Image: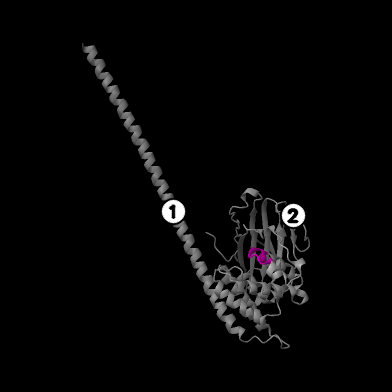
Amino acid sequence: MLELRYHMRENQSARQNRELERQFYEIQRETSRLEQMEHQTRELEREQRERIERRRMALAHMHQEARESLQQLHYSLSQSEKIMAFSKPAIQEEDLLASSQLRTVAYKLVELGLANLAENIFRHISILRSNEPQSFRDLALLLQESTNIQYNHIIEISDLFKKVILGEWDNRFAEIEVTALHELNWFLFRFHQQQQIAASLDNRLIRHLHVDLRIVLVWDTDLDLHVIEPTGEECYYSHKNTANGGMISRDFTRGYGPEEYLIRKATKGTYTVRVKYFANHQQSLTGATTIMVYIYKYYGESNQQKEIVTLRLDSNKEMIDVCKVEFDDDVKRKSQHIRTHCQKFEYEYSSKYYL
């Protein structure tokens, strides 16, 4: 009997010990879970603080840029009143500089989404610099981005493009009509106006040509566009055609470009966009130069995608990496929205924060 009671007490003690061990392990697991949740909460709070700080810095930077742009706009508008008519024999350098600054401000307004203000400036420039085809091209490109285009707008935009294509321009603007013709044909295709416009142009010029990738550079100083294809082959003014079919337009050593890179059937991979920068007298006067790079995927097609990269260059660095463009040639994805991954390299002259 005593032995039986002893065994019963021993079994009861063993069960109690096992229960205590089970409770101890559960407490340990719960403690570990709570510690993990606390750690995750701290990480989320840290990431939230970092996001808030990045957004604050970006907003502060955008505010500073906007303030500088408005100051520059105010100065440019005050200077533009001094610009003499182009019919006069001489134009002062400060007058030319004022209209150049106006163009830079208009580009910045386009980047900020202030199309109405940019339109007023581009219209002003088209009067001040009517001897430059870029004045009319800039206005046409801006107007066609409107979300409410009426028939009279279509006529105006077509007329602006035709003025560039058919106009007689200085030799320094040679071949800009090729770029404008390509853009006019896409505009006509987009708004189904081929038949209406064909009557005023040679039928041989009305042809819709689409390309997988189009990169366009505009500037307010002397720059050269360089594009390194996924194969490593570099396309630029001294090597205008690549083995994969990439080609680059004529090099504009004066004026505002544009200079463009085209490839009809783009190879899958990364395209590196670079510019070769030549500091000039204008840069020494303004303290910086502005470039805009327009990146189009499936240009001329219904699923066309566009991204604009703007840089303000304060450095005299000769070769500058602007961005990288990732291109995926999977036909199934052509109808989907493929975001252009364009990461600016962290130079001291970068003009924009990316969150």
Figure quadrant of the N terminus: top left
Tell me the kind of residue under disc 1: Arg
**236 horizontally vs 95: left or right:** right
Q: Separation of disc 2 and disc 1 at Cα? A: 43 Å
- Residue lying at the far left in this picture: please name it: 1
- Residue lying at the far bottom in this picture: please name it: 88
Q: Is residue 223 visible?
A: no
In the rendering, at what x and y percent does residue 245 appear? 76, 55
Decide: few, some or many residues near mark 1? Use Cα within 10 Å; few <14, some 14-19, many ≥20: few
Res 83 quadrant in image: bottom right
Residue at the location (65% across, 49% down)?
331
Residue under label 2, please give it: 233
What's the mark number on residue 82? none
Q: Is residue 59 visible?
A: yes
Q: Which residues are magenta?
A: 186-194
Identify the secondary structure beneath mark 1: helix
In the rendering, at what x and y percent does residue 21 appear? 33, 29
Identify the secondary structure beneath mark 2: loop
What secondary structure is the stretch in magenta mostly built from? helix
Tell me the kind of residue under disc 2: Glu
| Nearer mark to the viewer, of 2 and 1 | 2
Res 352 quadrant in image: bottom right
Position of 13 relative to 188 (above/below): above
Residue at the location (38% across, 40% down)?
33
- Tell me, yes or no, whether the highlighted magenta stretch contains residue 277: no
In the rendering, at what x and y percent does residue 26 appear? 34, 34
Q: Earlier in the sequence, mark 2 or mark 1?
A: 1
Residue at the location (39% across, 46% down)?
38
Residue at the location (63% across, 67% down)?
292
- Residue lying at the far top in this picture: please name it: 1
Give the color scheme: rainbow, by chain, secondary structure or one colour: one colour
